[in-house]
Amino acid sequence: MSISTEQFQLTKLSKSGGCAGKIGPGELSHILSHLSTVTDPNVLVGTSTSDDAAVYKISDDLALVCTSDFFSPMVDDAFLFGEIAAANALSDIYAMGATPLFALNLLAYPSLALPPVHLGEMLKGASTKVIEAGTSTIGGHTVENPEIKFGLAVVGTVHPSKIWRNSEAEAGDILILTKPIGSGIVADAIKKGECPTDAFTETAHTMSSLNKVASEAMIRSNIQVNACTDVTGFGLLGHLFEIAEGSGLEATLELSKIPTIEGVKELIKNGYVPSGTHKNLQYLRKNLESQSTISEEELLLLADAQTSGGLLFSIPKESLEAAKNALLASNVLCAVIGTMHEGTAGKITILDN
Ligand code: CO
Ligand code: CO
């Protein structure tokens, strides 16, 4: 975090506020159904499996990984917002097991309403994260717009046989999550000017942290990753649903094992739940089976629309100890939150233990 932007409220130039204002999973699959069928054999990952990024094969040992992400500010600090936007956009590259090559800025902003100093801070924040990712921003596009929207398109590379898809989890796999959930709830409280300092600090840290460390730790230690995705706008439940459905498997989550941002449960009780989170739960409910002791608030938290959330790995049971060691040695949270197994494709059972 850099200069103080306390007098200037970036979030007031946003109607929706981050991922929380995103369209729901149902709406997205409807929109994507209008795309024409892809016949190019070099398309290794397209839109059919709701994966994090597109993957295009260039040669037998090289594929390009491409993604773009942009949204409205969920925090008032322009530098921090830039950091979050970049960490969030880069995340889809890491969720594919890939390495970023370069980034492009995507920016829409109201030039009269937004003082240049804040715009500069925002771009500086993003650039800090792009540099931390070991890459650079080499272009982009800017348009005039009444609301701020900022993000990046990122291009990376991966070996075609080492792509971490979201559709190849196997029965018996263990699910690992690398960041706590609840950032959408906190963003809702920030927007209403009623966020406790501790929750803000933890959320700012988690949203601006790169998933690079987790991704590289798994690759470096040769951990077999059967499936991976990052937890963003559709929430933990929505992105796990994509893994389960895509892999033709059922998932079980253990509620008490799921890491959450401190103070978030209190915020939900006080009514801070973004519309995107409600939408996610509404869409996913038919796929959920939860023990009767699990409250509606707890389900909302599991469905909470995240900004720049952690990686969700599905790995073989035999790799668990090695994965734990790899992540913990890199100071990455390693929460073992559930399992994948045979059953109804896309179904998620939530246990209260
Ligand atoms: Co993603
Ligand atoms: Co994306």
Image (cartoon, helix red, strand yellow):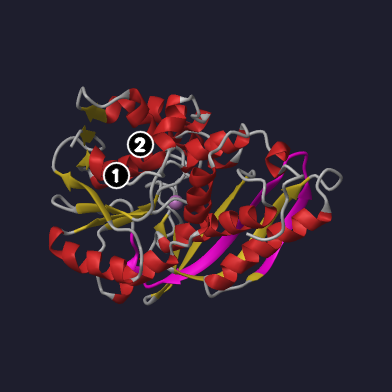
Side of 344 where 195 appears, left or right: right
Question: Which quarter of the figure is the N terminus placed in?
Answer: bottom right
Res 43 visible: no
Q: Amino acid at mark 2?
A: Leu
| Quadrant of the image containing the C terminus | top left
Q: Amino acid at mark 1?
A: Ile
User: Measured along the vertical axis of the image, is residue 310 above or below residue 58?
Assistant: above
Q: Main secondary structure of the magenta part?
A: strand
Residue 161: within the magenta? yes
What residue is at 53 percent from the left and 34 percent from the top?
A: 23
Q: Where does the image place residue 191, in percent across and percent down from the top left?
A: 61, 35
> Height in image: 228 above or below 19?
below
Cβ of mark 2 under 8 Å from ligand 1: the answer is: no
**Does 24 sit left or right of 225 as displayed?**
right
The label on residue 152 is none
Q: Residue tagged by mark 2?
A: 302
- The percent coordinates of residue 208 (x first, y second) are 53, 57
- Residue 198 is inside the magenta segment: no
Residue 294 to residue 73: above or below: above
At x 37% / y 38%, what residue is drawn? 238
Q: Residue at x 76, y 60 (%)?
A: 120
Identify which residue, 263 or 221, lies in the foreground: 263
Of mark 1 and mark 2, the one earlier in the sequence is 1
User: Disc 2 on helix, strand or loop?
Assistant: helix
Task: Give the magenta range.
Answer: 138-164
Q: Which mark is on residue 258?
A: 1
**Residue furthest to the front:** 197
How packed is label 1: few (under 14 Cα within 10 Å), some, or many (20 or more)? some
Q: Label 1: state its secondary structure.
A: loop
Q: Are marks 1 and 2 in contact (CB under 8 Å)?
A: yes
Disc 2 crowd, CA 10 A, few/some/many (<14, 14-19, 20+): many
Q: Nearer the viewer, residue 234 or 208?
A: 208
